[in-house]
Image (tube, rainbow, N blue to C red):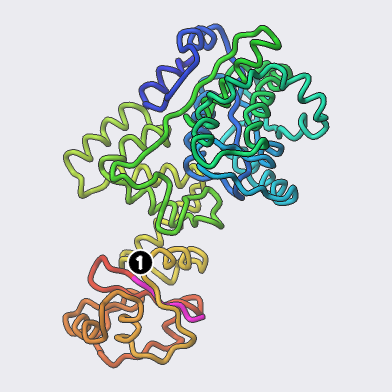
Amino acid sequence: MADILDELEWRDVIAQTTDIDALRKALADGPITVYAGFDPTAPSLHVGNLATLLILTRFQRAGHRPIGLVGGATGLIGDPSGRSTERALNSSDIVAEWVARIRVQVEKFLSFEEGPTAATLVSNLDWTANLSAIDFLRDVGKHFPVNRMLARESVSARLAGEGLSYTEFSYQILQANDYLELHRRHGCTLQLGGSDQWGNITAGVDLIRRVEGAHVHALTGKLITKADGTKFGKTAGGAVWLDPALTSPYAFYQYWLNADDRDVVRFLKVFTFRTREEIDELEKAVAERPAAREAQRALAEDLTTLVHGSDELARVIAASRALFGQGSLAELDARTLESALAEVPKAVVPALGAPYVELLAQSGLVESKSAARRAVKEGGAYLNNTKITDEEYVPSTDDLLHGRFLVLRRGKKTVGGVEVA
């Protein structure tokens, strides 16, 4: 059985463990059951959640039994971890809808094929919905010293600021009870999570020790940061989601393709299943041939395939090439073309009729109509990858792709678009 801890240490993803030597021995003694939880605080997981989900996947590939937990109950409450203000509570209908969507996403990364490492997917609403307040306080709450609860970072940070409600204060008890239930039902002895979850996870470790007298484990992944100081997993438009309806596969691919040279090797370790040898070679490529962006391309292709599938990757690559004159725009389907143009400067017009130079200026690819005329004169203006030589050319409906779009380009690398809406 592969030494998963050595793998995680090489990939530099471990932030904290309760007792790494004891965990290493437990892993060596035979397969263990390990779980990670994902709360439905949005209709989709994002790339920050993906880091934890991939650690869970690595445990399964190393021969252990994974449980993916979706927080149908905890999603109704709200985790104070990493937040400076109280979380707005969503309705039970919204949470239920988001639980269903996130279950589908988690399922994609785990194998449910029958066997000793078959994955299990659960919702903590299954054992929490019928738990009365009296039973909760007597059977679970009595094991939580208030002074220790107050000392946990997620609580103390909020108490030093705007404070928090009893609802969010109780979140750590609910998460701890999840660990206890999974320990009882499935023999689970390891919980994974992000580093901001450390207090909640160790609360579960303590609860199991107090109630069952058993020694279980906790492991958290490192918070992923970007070298330029910007928040990881964010674009100008917001978070990078796993749901293609929220972040298109094209935008997802471009996010990784644009990774900073200082970040890309670290991202390859965290987010791909490439071997040490493969990543070492790509690290050399970054140092010796940075302009080729081989490592970024490998990262973008691996992750787009992992999250969206190989067919979607092929469409994305075709769109990327076609936008820059290296493929046929006419062969792109409407959804892929629309997604690609959403990532570049674009003008939206009610109808055609304006000259090309005016549309070029409206799109933002040039600062003015006179600059657009210069681009045409200098031979650097394109419409749907065809060079425009007539300054007075007016695009017609025959030029529209899928009846809606025009692709504009200035020079080799500056792309924009027009949408008729």
Tell me the residue that label 1 is attached to.
323
- Viewer-proximal residue among 15 and 279: 15
The residue at the point 32 percent across, 75 percent down is 364
Q: Position of residue 94 (x, y in %)?
A: 70, 51
Rendered view: 400 above or below 241: below
The residue at the point 59 percent across, 20 percent down is 147
Task: State which quadrant residue 106 falls in.
Answer: top right
Secondary structure beneath label 1: helix
Is 419 covered by the magenta stretch?
A: yes
Q: In the image, what residue type sits under mark 1?
A: Leu
Q: Position of residue 108 (x, y in %)?
A: 59, 40
The residue at the point 63 percent across, 40 percent down is 78
Q: Which contiguous range is marked in magenta?
A: 416-421
Task: State which quadrant residue 235 falls in.
Answer: bottom left
The residue at the point 19 percent across, 79 percent down is 379
Name the chief secondary structure element in magenta: strand
Label 1 crowd (10 A; few <14 / some 14-19 / many >=20): many
- Viewer-proximal residue among 371 and 313: 371
- Viewer-proximal residue among 286 and 319: 286
Please state if 105 lies on the left or on the right of 340 as rendered.
right
Please state if 113 lies on the left or on the right of 377 as rendered.
right
How many numbered marks appear?
A: 1
Rendered view: 4 above or below 296: above
